Image: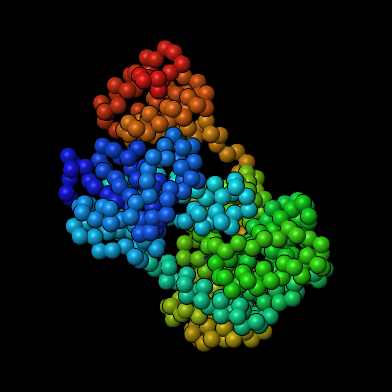
């Protein structure tokens, strides 16, 4: 470590040095000034992003004086760590002479996500989410640099490979123009229990037989609701849902495969002509990082998609994030009744075909609850697999050949309906702030305590609640005398409208 006065030198790099790397530098200066000397730069500097400035100002950090710089400006400096925070910088980051370690930790690109946001508020939510994710990462520094980052990078690489394989396979399916069947089955919508009346206005070519159930029926949609379909493919469930929520509602589909999305978008005009409805939108994005604002959706649907994700807990956390309090989930997906034989588990065809990536049925409920959702129900629906078997689906036949003698796919895999709800009782901003205050004491983090005291004051939280939170934080903190006892004393003995010295 080339410590300067005991601090480690860290350079955050992204493409434009306009948003993510600037946020990271600012967080490190705010939260870790005693341990880290932070800098940022870009591969192609493009000026400070005003929306990044705005969301940092919301948390009391003024970055308006920071400047977007080219990495060449810092080439003579020696860094202990060079951390790329976007994929492009990772690929084009030059060899850094004298850098102790070059690491990558990827964050979503707020300007890119904002460009497909429905409105300014949604755009700003992307910036806020990434701001908070970067903060969480910086808070863990420098300890996480040797462990978390290395592991995350490995995991990320594995996830990226399988995601790319799946994306290419579905792009091919979209290009093939088959109306039915896809690799996840060969079950046209009517065979899955869709009502003929619901299907009559859907655009041509939308029913590609890619689903494994009928989540729209499961959701009991009401007029005026906002519905989000994860992995919408050519958009069947989005169009069916759009009719049910009507002109005052909205149906949004998200899919990572541009070719699928192009198919879905091509149907919007025909749908409008047939129904008079203009309440459908399709967004390009991954279900692990939804391009959707916090607490903006009444119902999340998904049909035979989550099994394909390499990070299912993250998908469920995203579902919980985008749902409004009281919002609900109606998902149809494939799950395993018992572990698959290795031959099937390792087959790319079975992965793309929604089988090899599926988790055991008993793992699903706890995963959904862990994400913060309540009233979770997982109901196996073996009839879907039975139908595939009856229809002599090609994939089924190939997988069956890889199974032990006398066993069928239905012995291993079932379709399942998952329902859940986001609890109404979300924590108020004041309660969250008090928890953060106590946690700052526990973590012995002086700047955090200052920051959360400021926030508590802005929110008008009363003195006795603040003292209680501090007491709890102290109780949890190990060791009798921490570095912050002086500051805590100041707070305890303050007698006016300010907390501690310097008007804070
Ligand atoms: C089996 S198809 C289901 C399509 C649609 N739900 C239906 O029932 O017709 C899976 C779809 O999920 C998309 N997908 C898979 N993994 C995804 C991910 N991680 N993020 C976003 N979309 C994904 C694929 O591009 C594909 O369109």
Residue 21 lies, in percent from the top left, at 38, 51
Up the image or down, 420 lies above or below 213; here it is above
Residue at the location (40% across, 62% down)? 87
| x then y, percent, for residue 467 | 42, 22
**What residue is rendered at 61% in x and 77% in y?**
174
Q: Is residue 219 left or right of residue 347?
A: right
Question: Which residue is painted at 52% across and 73% down in the image?
Answer: 167
Position of residue 95 relative to residue 52, above or below, is below
The picture quadrant for ligand 1 comes to: bottom right
User: Which quadrant: the C terminus?
Assistant: top left
Above or below: residue 408 compared with residue 10: below
Is 328 in front, or is 161?
161
Residue drawn at point x = 53 percent, y = 56 percent = 113
- In x, y percent, where is residue 212? 64, 71
Residue 95 falls left or right of residue 261: left
Q: Nearer the viewer, residue 387 or 474?
A: 474
Asked which colour scheme the image uses, the reply is rainbow
Q: Is residue 188 visible?
A: no
Residue placed most toward the observer, 434 or 130: 130
Whether residue 451 is visible here, answered yes or no, is yes
């Amino acid at each position: 470590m080339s410590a300067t006065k005991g601090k480690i030198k860290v350079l955050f790099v992204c493409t434009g040095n306009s948003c993510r790397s600037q946020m990271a530098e600012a967080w490190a200066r705010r939260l870790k000034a005693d341990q880290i000397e932070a800098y940022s730069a870009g591969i192609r500097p493009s000026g400070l992003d005003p929306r990044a400035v705005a969301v940092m100002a919301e948390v009391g950090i003024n970055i308006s004086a920071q400047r977007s710089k080219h990495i060449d400006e810092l080439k003579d400096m020696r860094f202990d760590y060079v951390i790329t925070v976007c994929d492009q910088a990772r690929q084009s980051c030059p060899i850094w002479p004298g850098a102790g370690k070059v690491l990558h930790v990827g964050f979503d690109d707020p300007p890119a996500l904002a460009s497909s946001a429905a409105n300014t508020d949604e755009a700003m939510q992307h910036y806020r989410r990434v701001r908070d994710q970067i903060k969480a990462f910086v808070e863990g520094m420098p300890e996480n640099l040797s462990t978390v980052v290395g592991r995350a990078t490995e995991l990320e690489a594995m996830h990226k490979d399988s995601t790319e394989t799946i994306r290419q396979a579905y792009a091919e399916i979209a290009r093939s123009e088959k109306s039915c069947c896809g690799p996840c089955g060969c079950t046209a919508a009517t065979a899955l229990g869709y009502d003929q009346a619901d299907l009559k206005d859907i655009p041509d070519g939308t029913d590609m037989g890619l689903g494994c159930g009928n989540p729209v029926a499961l959701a009991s949609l009401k007029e005026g609701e906002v519905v989000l379909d994860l992995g919408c493919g050519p958009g069947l469930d989005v169009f069916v849902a759009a009719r049910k929520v009507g002109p005052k509602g909205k149906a949004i589909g998200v899919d990572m495969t541009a070719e699928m999305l192009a198919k879905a978008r091509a149907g919007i005009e025909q749908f409008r002509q047939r129904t008079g409805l203009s309440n459908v939108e399709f967004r390009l994005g991954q279900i692990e990082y939804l391009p959707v604002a916090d607490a903006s959706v009444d119902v999340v649907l998904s049909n035979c998609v989550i099994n394909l994700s390499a990070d299912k807990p993250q998908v469920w956390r995203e579902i919980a994030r985008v749902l409004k309090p009281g919002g609900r989930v109606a998902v149809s997906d494939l799950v395993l009744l018992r572990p698959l034989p290795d031959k099937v588990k390792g087959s790319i065809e079975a992965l793309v075909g929604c089988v090899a990536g599926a988790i055991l049925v008993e793992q699903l409920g706890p995963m959904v609850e862990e994400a913060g959702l309540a009233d979770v129900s997982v109901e196996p629906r073996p009839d879907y697999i039975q139908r595939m078997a009856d229809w002599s689906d090609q994939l089924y036949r190939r997988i069956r050949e890889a199974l032990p003698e006398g066993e069928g796919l239905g012995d291993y895999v079932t379709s399942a309906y998952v329902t859940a709800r986001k609890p109404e009782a979300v924590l108020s901003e004041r309660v969250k702030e008090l928890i953060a205050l106590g946690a700052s004491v526990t973590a012995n983090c002086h700047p955090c305590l200052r920051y959360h005291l400021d926030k508590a004051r802005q929110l008008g939280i009363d003195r006795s609640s603040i003292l209680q939170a501090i007491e709890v934080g102290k109780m949890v903190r190990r060791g009798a005398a921490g570095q912050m006892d002086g500051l805590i004393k100041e707070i305890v003995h303050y007698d006016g409208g300010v907390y501690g010295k310097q008007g804070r």
